[in-house]
Amino acid sequence: MKPIISRNELLAIVATVLLVNGIIQLWMIWAQDAVYVRAPYGNIKALASLPAEGLLIAGYGEGQLSLFKTRNGELIRNLVAHESPLICLSAIQATSDVVTAAQDGSVCVWTMPAGKLRLRWVAHKHGLTDARVTADGLGVVTANGTRKVRLWKLSDGTLKTEFDLPKEVMFAGLDASRHVLAVAANDRRIELWKLTQGKPQTSVSLNGKQVGKFVFGSTTCTIAVVNSSGTITIFDAQTGKQRQRLAGQNYTVHAMELFADDHRLISGASDGTVCVWDIDSGAQLRRFESRRLHVGSVAFIDDGKVASGGMDNTIILWDCNLPMLP
């Protein structure tokens, strides 16, 4: 029996469908007023920006860094930062330094825009599960899945404080006041430790879901938490009281960041959506469809743009048209 369609005809149809799909994706990005950037590496793990320098920094799964111009996405240079996947990439606006940390336990401080390595040390010899810069830009908090949580000085890489907690900690960070230490293990809550008292003050419940990620506000006592189902909840870090829930992003949220004013948040999900939220009202201010699966990194850029990156080598700069801080 003669086939209805030949093999060559089938291949031509498939190629046409893929081409049309690619054109649609590019048109969707153009229609949403975005800049499409091709990064030199894949598996983008983190993004950060230095608006005063006009820089966007991308960190990758193999430990590299790339510097781009935020104006048009032009690649400036690549850097070899670590020999294992990045778990932290933070930009310090006051000094134009960038802090990176990797799973092998190493922490680096870079001077921008020159891209020069200023400091490097090993925070935990058995590796890291979390590292995050304090709100004042003077220290970095590290955890490695044990009971030891450490606070390091970014000026010289020396250990300032070590917290010996009663159970293993996967994630840890200090609030803007440096008076509250938030810690989380592989369970369904975040404990908030009042450092002046040396014991848990309260805990944040995630409705039976595991902690996926949390970020602190830079100027206020705000902590944003996403659970394993993708729900984002805003809490007061001093009291643990829930302030707001952000609903409307229906897939798992892999990345989020608070803007400098602590009133807006950007999130990226596994379905390729990127959302900008007003955390006071819970309103979704912007929603972008990247048409690329798994947004794993996001960053605010101070000229009215946000950036998103994923498992491939695509970075998208979205124009939010949001009012910026004076």
Image: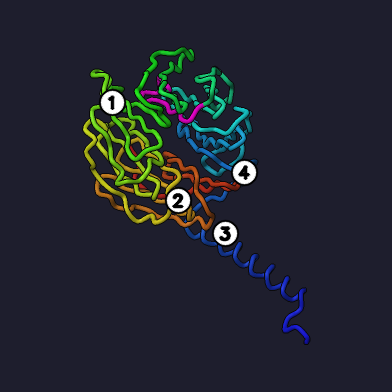
- Which label sits in the foreground, 2 or 3? 2
Neighbourhood count class around disc 2 (C-alpha, 10 Å): few under 14, some 14–19, many 20 upward: many
Residue 29 placement (x, y as % from top left)? 52, 57
**Do the residues bearing badges 2 and 3 touch, measured as CB atoms within 8 Å?**
no
Measure the alpha-carbon separation of dots 2 and 3. 19 Å
In percent of the image, x 45 and y 50: which residue is there?
269
Q: Find numbered disc 4 in the image and state the secondary structure of the residue it sits on.
A: loop
Q: Earlier in the sequence, mark 4 or mark 3?
A: 3
Q: Find numbered disc 2 in the image and state the secondary structure of the residue it sits on.
A: strand
In this rendering, is residue 263 above or below 22?
above
Query: What residue sits right under mark 3 in the picture?
Result: 26
Indicate the quadrant containing the N terminus: top left, top right, bottom left or bottom right.
Answer: bottom right
Measure the alpha-carbon separation of dots 1 and 3. 47 Å
**Do the residues bearing badges 4 and 1 touch, measured as CB atoms within 8 Å?**
no
Measure the alpha-carbon separation of dots 4 and 2. 18 Å
Q: Nearer the viewer, residue 188 or 104?
A: 188
Q: Earlier in the sequence, mark 4 or mark 1?
A: 4
Q: Amino acid at mark 4?
A: Gly
Q: Nearer the viewer, residue 197 or 152?
A: 197
Give the magenta-colored segment's residue range: 128-140
Query: What residue sits right under mark 1 in the picture?
Result: 193
